[in-house]
Amino acid sequence: ARLPARPACARGSRGFTFLGRWVVVFGFAPGDLVSPVRALQQLGPVTKHCNTGDTSGGGPANYLFVQFATCLDRDRAVASGNPTLLNDSVLVSVSALTPDLATRLRFLDALENQGLRASAGGP
C-alpha cells in the first residue's frame, strides 16, 4: 500500500476537514500580503486567508495561510511548481497544510487572532 503524497480532503488531526483546502504560502516580502493572494486567485477561488501577525522574532512572518474553495484548487496551487513565479514580481512556494505544519506554525492561533474560525464543513 502506498501512502498519499499530500493530505487528502479528509478530517484533520483535530477533527476538522479544513486542512484539506488550506495551503501555506511563503517566500514573499513580509509586508506584501496582497500580491500572493491575488496571484493565487488565478489558480482557483480563495475563500479565506490569514497571516500570522507579529512573530516572536519581533516582526511579521513571510508566510500566509490560504484556503481554496475546493481540494482540486488546492492541488492546482501545490502542483504549480515550487518555487512558483506568480507574476512579474512575486516568487513564492506553496505547500499543502499538513497537521504537523499547522501545529508548528500555530495555525489555529493565527485564525483566532484575526477573528476567523476553522470551518468544520465539508471539503
Image (cartoon, rainbow, N blue to C red):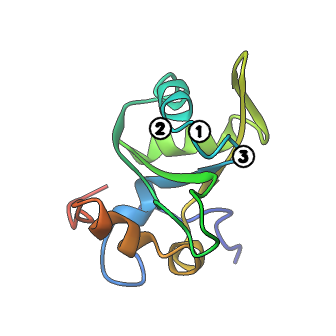
Which residue is the site of mark 2?
A: 73
Which residue is the site of mark 1?
A: 77
Label 1 secondary element = helix
| Callout 2 touching callout 1 (CB < 8 Å) | yes
Q: In the rendered image, which quarter is residue 18 located in? A: bottom left
- The amino acid type, in three-letter code, at marker 3 is Gly
Q: CA distance from mark 2 to mark 1?
A: 6 Å
- The amino acid type, in three-letter code, at marker 1 is Ala
Label 2 secondary element = helix
Q: Is residue 69 visible?
A: no
Question: Could you tell me residue 37's position as x and y percent?
Answer: 48, 34
- Image point 54% across, 63% down: which residue? 97
Tell me the quadrant of the picture where the C terminus can be found.
bottom left
Which residue is the site of mark 3?
A: 27
Q: Report crowding for label 3: few under 14, some 14 to 19, many 20 or more residues within 10 A (C-alpha).
A: some
- The amino acid type, in three-letter code, at marker 2 is Asp
| Relative to 89, 107 lies left or right | left
